[in-house]
Amino acid sequence: MANQAMLGGWTGTQDATEETQQICDAVKDQVEQRTNQNYVVYKAVQFRSQLVAGTNLTIKVFAGEEDYIHLSVFHQLPCDGGNVELRNVEVGKTKYDPLGPFPYC
């Protein structure tokens, strides 16, 4: 249970799941708008999460060849609508860049 975090704490880096990919797919249009890119390859590979009043996620996405992007996403609780909100995108990442929480603005 090393990857489980206490409320408010971040989990360790985990392999992406089908649910992680679904969350990425839900924000793909927003990611493409913010980065001015059209991602043909867009596959979630790793993630970290933080349980708050919903879930903060940092997700590493493979974007083709040697390109990776990191996403900061907030997933609302189902009782609050369950919506997924893209908070930030970092481009120019590599396979080896660590996946950490985004700084808050």
Image: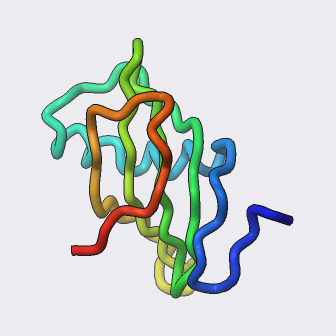
Could you tell whether 21 is left or right of 72 in the image? right
Q: Position of residue 41 (x, y in %)?
A: 42, 21
Which residue sits at x=39%, y=45%?
A: 70
Up/down of 78 relative to 73, above or below = below
Which residue sits at x=38%, y=58%?
A: 72
> Going by the picture, which residue comes out furthest to the top?
65
- Decide which of 6, 43 is in the foreground and name it: 6
Q: Position of residue 32 (x, y in %)?
A: 23, 38
Q: Quadrant of residue 94?
A: top left
Q: Position of residue 79 (x, y in %)?
A: 56, 86
Up/down of 87 relative to 40, above or below = below
Q: Quadrant of the C terminus?
A: bottom left
Up/down of 16 relative to 39, above or below = below
> Going by the picture, which residue comes out furthest to the right?
1
Which residue sits at x=54%, y=84%?
A: 52
> Going by the picture, which residue comes out furthest to the left?
36
Could you tell whether 16 is left or right of 26 in the image? right
- Decide which of 2, 48 is in the foreground and name it: 2
Q: Position of residue 98 (x, y in %)?
A: 49, 45
Which residue sits at x=50%, y=62%?
A: 57
Marker count (numbered):
0
Up/down of 39 relative to 33, above or below = above
Q: Quadrant of the N terminus?
A: bottom right
